[in-house]
Amino acid sequence: MMSHVLPTYNRAPIAFDRGEGTWAIATDGTRYLDLGSGIAVNVLGHANPDLVAALTEQAGKIWHVSNLYQIPQQERLADLLVEHTFADTAFITNSGTEAAELAIKMVRKYWSDLGQDRIEILTFEGAFHGRSTGAIAAAGSEKMTKGFGPLMPGFRTLPWGDHDALRAAVGDRTAAIMIEPVQGEGGIRPLPDMCLRGLRELCDQHGALLVLDEVQCGMGRTGRLFAHEHAGIAPDIMMVAKGIGGGFPLGAVLATEKAAAGMVAGTHGSTYGGNPLACAVGARVMEIVANDAFLAEVNRKAALFRQRLEGLVAAHPDVFETVRGQGLMLGLKCKVAPTDVVKAGYAQHLLTVPAADNTLRLLPPLNIADDEIAEAVARLDRAAASLA
């Protein structure tokens, strides 16, 4: 008999009852050190007091009204996003997939309003932009798309890191280039700053839009509020989600006035998107994470964590190959199956996340303590030793 929950996930046999900061506590009372953060979502850890206060205060007032009316909490979140980024405007969604769908629509509408037949969006091998029909067409991998055709047309997937293929692909029908500054599902693969600057220049040369997917690498994860800031460039459109809600379902599309000009009343909508409850939490996350002192601590902790991980790799050369990533979006390239390391981690009461390219993802809360970093590496060390 089929599970009452549609069986689209291979779930670990662990259920959690509550959480405290970097710790997730299972229904049997076992405490797990959480280096997954719900896949880069819980940027301030579990049951963060500031977020609990924001949520409960708003929950006692009003939860949902729809976008037929003005929503002060949504306006506050949009103000914070515009204040701290390149953007002139923001649309609040419930998820990263929804953000991807709007970003695609915004690109298409931009060129349609200009009366130009530019529909091709260039994407890259290893990308992940969500699981809706548009998002899987953008990613283009067989794993994502098999059995779900016919796919939405208008995307061309290019090899990761192939500059010649990119230059050959860009032309007068290119509507946009869409890319993650750091690939998450693709294996914690950062795009070098010079390459991101090159993409911006290429888009400017051809009049194409640059769309950045910062769903996983944004919201302080790399040590800057958004990862593209390391390269000193700005996109035209950006997708945000995961960390922006600190665990509450929330996403956003940020855009310049020029890129968003076609999105007038009636062109897009969302029943739940931008509801008061989600936006109250999101605004509090932004107030905390966008603080320079907070981001400085992320960078300090990231340097400490990476240094200890380099030692871990040196101690287990048969299990690990290298450390990669940026900030607290770190990956261990493995010589064994990453899922084996994940399972060995369970035995050490440690939560990690597998990714493509034989990589183990380490995505702790951004406020992880120094002693928790030391404990995490000790548990990884024991997990690796069990696989030798």
Image (tube, helix red, strand yellow):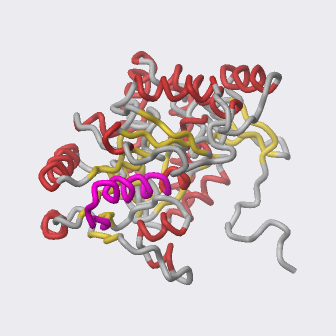
Q: Is residue 268 visible?
A: yes
Total marks in image: 0
Q: Is residue 238 left or right of residue 134?
A: left
Q: Is residue 323 visible?
A: no
Task: Indicate the position of residue 178 as horizontal and vertical percent values.
Answer: 33, 56
Tell me if residue 388 is in the magenta stretch: no
Q: Is residue 103 above or below residue 265?
A: below
Q: Residue at x 18, y 52 (%)?
A: 207
Q: Is residue 301 above or below residue 116?
A: above
Q: Is residue 295 left or right of residue 19?
A: left
Tell me if residue 105 is in the magenta stretch: yes
Q: Tell me the quarter of the image containing the N terminus.
A: bottom right
> Toward the viewer: 155 or 53?
155
Q: Residue at x 41, y 58 (%)?
A: 187
Q: Which residues are magenta?
A: 101-120
State the predominant SS element of the stretch in magenta: helix
Q: Residue at x 41, y 22 (%)?
A: 83
